[in-house]
Image: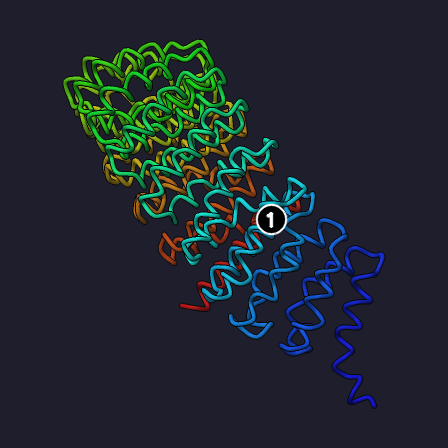
């Protein structure tokens, strides 16, 4: 008897757990569907499990979402592709529920299952499902229907294809804005499966309906479809059908629609070709750059470099540059910030002369902007301009502004300048660097903000690597060591950090003669934080200096620290001593 009852057990457990009051148990049960299906076998899964799931659709949204996800990968458990249509009924039910995320997941799973089904099964089972959803009484079913047309259409016979196109057209004119929104969102996917003869007639008439919709939420989704449709049509059809729509949209009464146009415009330029871009899209883009809504100007400003790449330099200078000049003094800081993040990329597009004449003054005004993000965005892209105009001009025109920013009141701006210094140093060369920037690098070691002091110590290490130990010995080490007697312990700690970073670059000889004595003196400091940092630095010096120096100088210093009254000092000193013993044992 138990032998016969055995296979019934998993389904009984599942049914019990699915009816349990505890949502977590129901969720766990759904997530184990594949295990249960394997235990039941393919036939019983088709005959018992799937019908049970179809009926059990009034559960919590979280459980339904998990079910919709599981069913998308369920084909192997129902007996492979020839039985895939058994999964459609539960997914159809889930496609009509009220919760949006459940419907979206069900549509995703329907697409996944449908794309693997045989053509005959698609005609017999999938297309009737699409028709039922599209004619659904409740708007949720019609919304879901829009997302599965592109799976059903390619395998449909001609008669059915005509019917599917007409159904989609009805959805584009549905009474409910949510359905029209879904139709607009999925139009590009559906259009990609349609024969070119019907593309110009049926699809374009649907597109026209959507672009003239009275709801801006539908129109802005139609804008997204413009780029997708533009790539499917021949350039001349694109100019005839898509271009006028975009030009109208760029003057739409809703700023959200204009915002979408600003985001999509450069993709459309590629679809329509260079001539219509010059004639129609450049004026539309200029309008967007001068829009009265800041959000639209932000979107348009962020695309200015990409747009200029499509045009030739003359057109860019004639039409786009005057707008860029206006945007650089825009009343919204976010517009200026968006412009600053991309404007450096215009330099390679416009070439050296135009950059010097037109862009440099804009860079300078943005470098002096009162909003820190604007200044930051310019600093971080300086190398793009350097490649175009050369370091001499860059240093003459922009360096005074950079030096000013090195003392900026916002620490993040100072930090960005510090991180840029090694790159600037390698481009300017050693002579110029000593002259203009050397003093700044030392000044940062005594900044009020810890992140700046830390970055300044790292900066010295990178400069020593760039210009070599001899230069560092002359220009960095003496100034750093002078600061070790600073009355404030936090600055003394920064110097210890700089010493530990410089030692590997400077090599054993300079470390022993110049750096180590300073560290040993600091071990007598009255502040425990300094002393335990001394222990850490000494530990980092062990691999750099000779074994004799370790035994003669470092070990006695650490032994003394290991008897310190402060518990942290003792801990780090003992850790360093342990490290010496490990090195000894391994050698």
Q: Which residue is mark 1?
A: 133
The picture places residue 244, in percent across and down from the top left corner, at: 33, 23
Coloration mode = rainbow
Task: Say which quarter of the image contains residue 264.
Answer: top left
Left or right of 375, for residue 425: left
Residue placed at 46% from the left, 42% from the top? 520
Compared to 115, does 219 lie above or below?
above
The picture places residue 384, in percent across and down from the top left corner, at: 25, 29
Residue placed at 44% from the left, 34% from the top? 206
Q: Quadrant of the N terminus?
A: bottom right
Labels in figure, total: 1
Mark 1 element type: helix
Compared to 90, does 291 lie above or below?
above
Residue 487 at least partly seen: no
Residue 16 at least partly seen: yes
Left or right of 473, for residue 335: right
Left or right of 553, for residue 142: right
The picture places residue 369, in percent across and down from the top left corner, at: 40, 13
Q: Quadrant of the C terminus?
A: bottom left
Q: Nearer the viewer, residue 24 or 370?
A: 24
């Amino acid at each position: 008897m138990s032998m016969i009852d055995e296979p019934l057990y998993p389904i009984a457990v599942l049914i019990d757990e699915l009816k349990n009051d505890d949502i977590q148990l129901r969720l766990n049960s759904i997530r184990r569907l594949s295990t249960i299906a394997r235990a039941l076998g393919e036939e019983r899964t088709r005959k018992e499990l799937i019908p049970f799931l179809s009926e059990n659709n009034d559960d919590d949204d979280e459980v339904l979402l998990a079910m919709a996800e599981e069913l998308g990968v369920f084909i192997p458990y129902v007996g492979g592709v020839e039985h895939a249509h058994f999964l459609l009924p539960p997914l159809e039910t889930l496609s009509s529920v009220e919760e949006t995320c459940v419907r979206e997941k069900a549509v995703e799973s329907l697409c996944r299952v449908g794309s693997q089904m045989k053509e005959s099964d698609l005609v017999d089972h999938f297309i009737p499902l699409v028709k039922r959803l599209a004619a659904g009484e409740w708007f949720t079913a019609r919304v879901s229907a829009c997302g599965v047309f592109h799976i059903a259409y390619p395998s449909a016979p001609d008669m059915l294809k005509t019917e599917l196109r007409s159904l989609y057209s009805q959805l584009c004119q549905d009474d409910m804005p949510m359905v029209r929104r879904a139709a607009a969102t999925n139009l590009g996917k559906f259009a990609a499966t349609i024969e070119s003869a019907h593309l110009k007639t049926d699809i374009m008439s649907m597109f026209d309906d959507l672009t003239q919709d009275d709801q801006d939420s539908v129109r802005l989704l139609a804008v997204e479809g413009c780029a997708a449709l533009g790539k499917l049509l021949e350039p001349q059809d694109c100019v005839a059908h898509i271009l006028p729509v975009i030009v109208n949209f760029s003057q739409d009464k809703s700023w959200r629609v204009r915002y979408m146009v600003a985001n999509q415009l450069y993709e459309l330029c590629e679809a329509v070709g260079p001539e219509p871009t010059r004639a129609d899209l450049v004026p539309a883009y200029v309008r967007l750059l001068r829009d009265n809504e800041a959000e639209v100007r932000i979107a348009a400003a962020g695309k200015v470099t990409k747009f200029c790449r499509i045009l030739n330099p003359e057109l860019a200078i004639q039409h786009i540059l005057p707008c860029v000049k206006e945007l650089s003094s825009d009343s919204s800081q976010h517009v200026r910030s968006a412009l600053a993040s991309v404007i450096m990329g215009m330099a390679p597009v416009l070439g050296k002369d135009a950059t010097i004449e037109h862009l440099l003054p804009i860079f300078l005004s943005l470098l002096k902007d009162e909003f820190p993000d604007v200044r930051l965005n310019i600093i971080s892209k300086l190398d793009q301009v350097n490649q175009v105009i050369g370091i001499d001009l860059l240093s003459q025109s922009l360096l005074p502004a950079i030096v000013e920013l090195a003392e900026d009141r916002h620490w993040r701006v100072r930090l960005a300048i510090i991180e840029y210094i090694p790159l600037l140093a390698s481009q300017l060369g050693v002579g110029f660097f000593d002259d203009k920037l050397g003093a700044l690098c030392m000044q940062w070691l005594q900044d009020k903000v810890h992140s700046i002091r830390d970055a300044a110590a790292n900066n010295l290490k990178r400069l020593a690597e760039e210009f070599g130990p001899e230069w560092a010995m002359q220009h960095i080490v003496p100034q750093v060591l002078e600061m070790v007697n600073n009355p404030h312990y936090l600055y003394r700690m920064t110097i210890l950090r700089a010493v530990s970073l410089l030692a590997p670059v400077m090599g054993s000889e300079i470390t022993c003669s110049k750096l180590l004595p300073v560290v040993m003196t600091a071990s007598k400091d009255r502040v425990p934080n300094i002393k335990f940092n001394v222990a850490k630095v000494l530990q980092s010096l062990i691999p750099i200096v000779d074994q004799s120096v370790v035994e003669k100088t470092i070990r006695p210093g650490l032994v003394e620290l290991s008897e310190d009254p402060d518990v942290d000092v003792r801990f780090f000193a003992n850790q360093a001593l342990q490290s010496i013993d490990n090195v000894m044992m391994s050698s």
